[in-house]
Structures are given as structure tokens and as C-alpha cells.
Amino acid sequence: MTSIRIDAHQHYWSIERDDYGWLTPANTTLYRDYLPVDLEAHLAKHEMNGSIVVQAAQSIAETDYMLGLASEHSSILGVVGWLDLHAPDYIQQLERFRAHPKFVGIRIMIQEMKDSDEVLESSMLQAITDLADSGVPVDLLCTSNQLHSVVELLKRVPHLHAVIDHIAKPQIAAQSFEPWRSQMAEIAANPGVYCKLSGMVTEADHQHWSTEQITPYIQHAIELFGYDRIMFGSDWPVCLLAASYDEVVGVLEQAIDSQLTSEDREKLFGRNAAAFYRLNL
């Protein structure tokens, strides 16, 4: 069996596109272009076959931009885009995206909702049910204090093929575990839901984090989801606010069982991502 290694979560952006409202010149680390040429050396160093690039702006135009990059760069194995699920033509937009061979899914930005229960409103619930019915992989971006809405969403749409981004952003800096721990257990009980071990260093103290602070969260996620439903993601370049690409990989390497089988290691670092996003590798 050929080894597959995939970074299941990272971003690209071009500042001049101007649809990244959260990116401002005050953010001196991230306010610049981040493109495939900037990541490919890191992917090569860690023997990654490539990456999944995930939307960073809530616009159709940005998804088209990423799909354009994917057409030009073999290191982009798949694109997780954005869809306006309130728009009357969202199904037509989805079908247009699906015509691109590297389109692999949609991300729902619960984190950006004023009230996370918006995801449970009838029109949104119908759109998410449509995604589930068509088997489209869905990334769910939320914070730990929004998990109650995700728990309820999965009760109402239990067949959603979903992955929780960034282990649902627990309060690592505060070393707080509840109700994140118990709500993630409810979510993990749904066999169709996966979890990305990503975006953790930026939930810790950016200047003073340690592997020891992050490890319990990683180990709990692994305990809940098992090695068949977890995947590594760097969250590069956002991770650079707190850690280098090498350090992000190192945190996960140190947190996992040193006796981990080669099969489970391959699942974590690539095979699960390939299966979840149905990559044709």
C-alpha cells in the first residue's frame, strides 16, 4: 500500500483580492500574500503528497480563486469552498463547484454567526440537509462555546458527512475542558463525523504555549474519534501567529502514542483525509 501524507487544512490568500475582512495591516504576521510557492517547501520537508486548501473568506469569488490555484498547482489535492446557504441558487452554485475535479467540500462558518443556533433555522437546516443528501463533505468551523448548536445540528441531520475543524477550538490558554470534553463526546458518537487535529497552537497563549498544555486536548480527541476519524491539519499560515510549520507537526508527533502502529499513523497523517474528502489519489 502506497504511503499517503496530506496536510488536511491550510489556507492561501492574496491581499489585493480584498475579500478577507478579518485581515488588516495591524496583523503584521498574516497581512501579506500566502501562496503555494510559500508552502510547498514545508510540504516537501514533511513528505506530504499535498494539501487541502480551505476557504478563508465568505465569498463565492474566493472559492473560484482557490479552484483556479488548484488547477495550476499539483500540491493542492482539494479545495473546501464556501457557499451562501441562504441564497436561492445555492444548489446551482454547488453544482458549478462540483464540476471542478479538485472541489472536495464546503465549510460552514458557525464561528462567524452572531448566534450559533442560526445553523438550526429552517432554511439553513434545509440547505445542510441537501448537502447531507448529496454526500458533500462539510467542514464545521465553530468555537467550543458553540458546540451545543453542533450537537443539536447532528441530531437533526445525522447523516451529515462532516469534520469538526480545529477540534472545535477549546479554551487551551485557560486550560478549560468542560463543556468541550462532554459535548465533543456527544458529537463523536455520530460515526459519520471526523475531527481535525489542527488550529490548536493559536488557541493556546501565542507567546508562551507548551506541548504539555495542548497534549490532553489532542489525546481526548483521539480517544473519542479513534484513529479512523482524525486527521492532521497545519492551519498554515494562521498557525504562524503562534508556531512554525515544523512546530505544529512536532506538537502532534509528541502528543501521540510512541507505540502507534504505522497503519494508524498513516490514517492520521493522510489516509483519513483522503477517505473523508474522497480524493482520487
Image: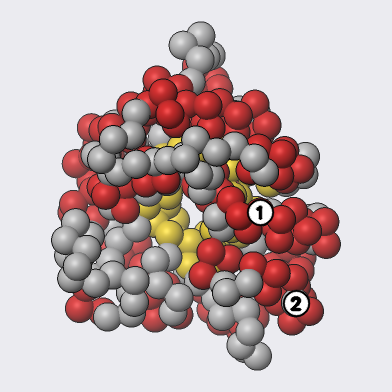
- CA gap, disc 1 and disc 2: 16 Å
Image coordinates for residue 235, horizontal then vertical, percent: 37, 49
Residue beneath disc 2:
121
Q: Residue at x 18, y 71 (%)?
A: 25
Regarding mark 1 in the picture, which secondary structure is present there? helix
Extreme residue toward the bottom, this view:
88
Few, some or many C-alpha atoms within 10 Å of disc 2 (few <14, some 14-19, many ≥20)?
few
Say what amino acid the circle numbered 2 marks. Glu
CB under 8 Å between discs 1 and 2: no
Q: Nearer the viewer, residue 75 or 109?
A: 109
Q: Quadrant of residue 55?
A: bottom left
Regarding mark 2 in the picture, which secondary structure is present there? loop
Q: Nearer the viewer, residue 7 or 256?
A: 256
Does residue 192 show up?
yes
Q: Residue at x 78, y 79 (%)?
A: 122
Say what amino acid the circle numbered 1 marks. Leu
Number of the label disc, if any, that sits on residue 147: 1
Number of the label disc, if any, that sits on residue 110: none
Say which of marks 1 and 2 sits in front: 1
Q: How is the image coloured?
A: secondary structure
| 163 displayed left or right of 238 | right
Image coordinates for residue 104, horizontal then vertical, percent: 53, 59
Extreme residue toward the top, this view:
259
- Of the image marks 1 and 2, the number of the one nearer the N terminus: 2
Q: Residue at x 28, y 35 (%)?
A: 208
Does residue 274 show up?
no
Image coordinates for residue 233, horizontal then vertical, percent: 43, 43
| 214 displayed left or right of 240 | right
Q: Quadrant of residue 220?
A: top right
Q: Residue at x 16, y 61 (%)?
A: 28
Image coordinates for residue 224, horizontal then vertical, percent: 68, 31
Q: Quadrant of residue 54?
A: bottom left
